Amino acid sequence: MRRYTSGMLRVDHLSKSLPQGRRLFENVDLRLGTGECVAILGESGAGKSTLLNLIAGLDHADAGTIDIDGVRLTGLPERERTQLRRYKIGFVFQAFHLLPHLTLEENVALTLILTQHKTHDARQAARKALDEVGLGDRTRDYPRQISGGEMQRVAIARALAHHPVLLLADEPTGNLDAGNAARVLQLMQSLMHTHGTATVLVTHSATTAAIADRRLRLTEGGLVSP
Ligand SMILES: Nc1ncnc2c1ncn2[C@@H]1O[C@H](COP(=O)(O)OP(=O)(O)OP(=O)(O)O)[C@@H](O)[C@H]1O
Ligand SMILES: [Mg+2]
């Protein structure tokens, strides 16, 4: 497989149209080095979540290429794309996506079990990740028993538990009050620094965007300075 020395994420000339044919964006270029954080801003409907889904290999682009840690994602068979996603990427979804019938510990451990960790080790690592986000005493709770801010922290623990090289975070502070947002941001920053995770941070909030090394705006013609 092709490897690049420069950059954890490399997106070239990416374009995407909607099923009805409307062009969402074209010519999206993005380079991200190890441990680097870029914030992506843009109007609602601009295609920010779609762009993250493309980078995660959950959706297909019409044109362009995506390389993650030197591996060309675009064109990889489904199975290999899933493997790449499981091992290399952490995703904090706009709507948490916690599984309601699993405890917090099981929600976090699931990602690790999918990456071939033994159940016992996965549970131990899940507890450690939950502890890192300040929820070490809530591991046996279910998602319905915790607040929105706490769910957001579980989502971050789950995204980072397997130490991905690339974190994709979609509005990680959306729906949080100022205090909880600040807490989640501080947490993400400290985890990014501890683990050297490269991060693409999608947000509407200027305060959230301020933690990034660079800020870009997604437009129909590509990523531009805000
Ligand atoms: N599966 C789909 N089928 C048809 N249209 C879709 C689909 N997914 C997204 N869209 C449309 O694509 C556009 C971009 O959606 P996307 O969720 O990427 O925007 P966004 O920039 O993340 O917006 P927001 O800031 O509100 O989260 C929207 O107009 C949306 O309605
Ligand atoms: Mg979105």
Image (spheres, rainbow, N blue to C red):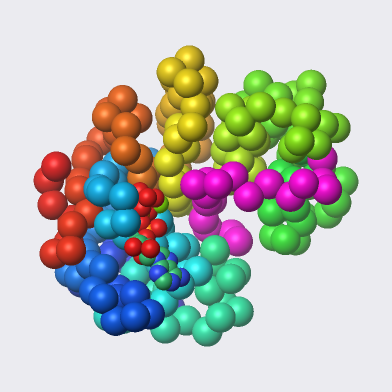
Quadrant, the C terminus? top left
Magenta residues span: 86-103
* Up-down relation of residue 56 to residue 14 (above or below): above
Residue 106's quadrant in the figure?
top right
Residue under the image location 26 percent in, 76 percent down:
22
Residue 96 covered by magenta stretch: yes
Is residue 213 depicted above or below 178 in this figure?
A: below
> Residue farthest to the front?
20
Q: Is residue 17 visible?
A: yes
Is residue 199 among the parts visible in the rendering?
no
* Residue at image point 65% right, 21% down: 134
Residue 179 in the image: above or below residue 122: above
143, 20: nearer the viewer:
20
Q: Where is residue 186 in the image (x, y as percent from the top left)?
A: 45, 22
Rendered location of residue 179, percent (x, y): 48, 15
Is 16 left, or right, of 78 in this rendering?
A: left
Q: Residue 107, how many percent across, how many down? A: 74, 46
Position of residue 226 in the picture relative to residue 147 (left or right) = left
Q: Is residue 109 located in the magenta-colored stretch of the structure?
A: no
